[in-house]
Image (cartoon, grey):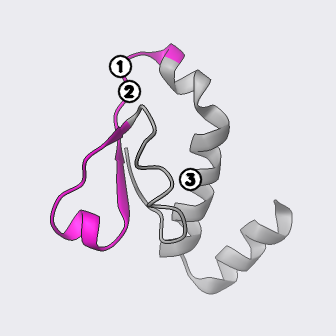
Amino acid sequence: MIMKLPGSAALVQDLSFERESKGAFRQHDWLIARFVSEEDILAEMPTLKACMAQSSCAVAPKKFARRVWAEA
């Protein structure tokens, strides 16, 4: 899974599912996440939901982003 995290890319670098980004991915705050099992995904679900919301808002039109953050 690849997500753009302009606000928290530095904060998630130490998470167990994060894989090292290189080149343009690192320069532009993209996170590469890899999971071994379904249990790993379920254990990190709150973090993943927050990352996916931030990533969606980072690449989506501003109107969509305002709506997502208003509902959160």
**Apparent side of residue 36 relative to residue 7 in the rendered image (left or right):** left
Q: Where is residue 54 shown, x and y percent of the image?
A: 59, 63
Q: Secondary structure at mark 3?
A: helix
- Looking at the picture, which amino acid does disc 1 mark? Val
Q: Which residue is mark 2?
A: 35
User: In the rendered image of this protein, does residue 31 appear above or below residue 6?
Assistant: above
Q: CA distance from mark 1 to mark 2?
A: 4 Å
Q: CA distance from mark 3 to mark 2?
A: 15 Å
- Please tell me in which quadrant of the rendered image residue 62 appears: bottom right
Residue pictured at 60% horizontal, 23% vertical: 43
- Looking at the picture, which amino acid does disc 2 mark? Phe
Q: Which residue is mark 3?
A: 51
Q: Please state the extent of the stretch shown in magenta in the rendering.
A: 18-39
**Apparent side of residue 18 relative to residue 72 in the rendered image (left or right):** left
Residue pictured at 53% horizontal, 62% vertical: 8
Of the two numbered discs 3 and 2 on the same chain, state the one appearing first in sequence: 2
Q: Which quadrant does the N terminus fall into?
A: top left
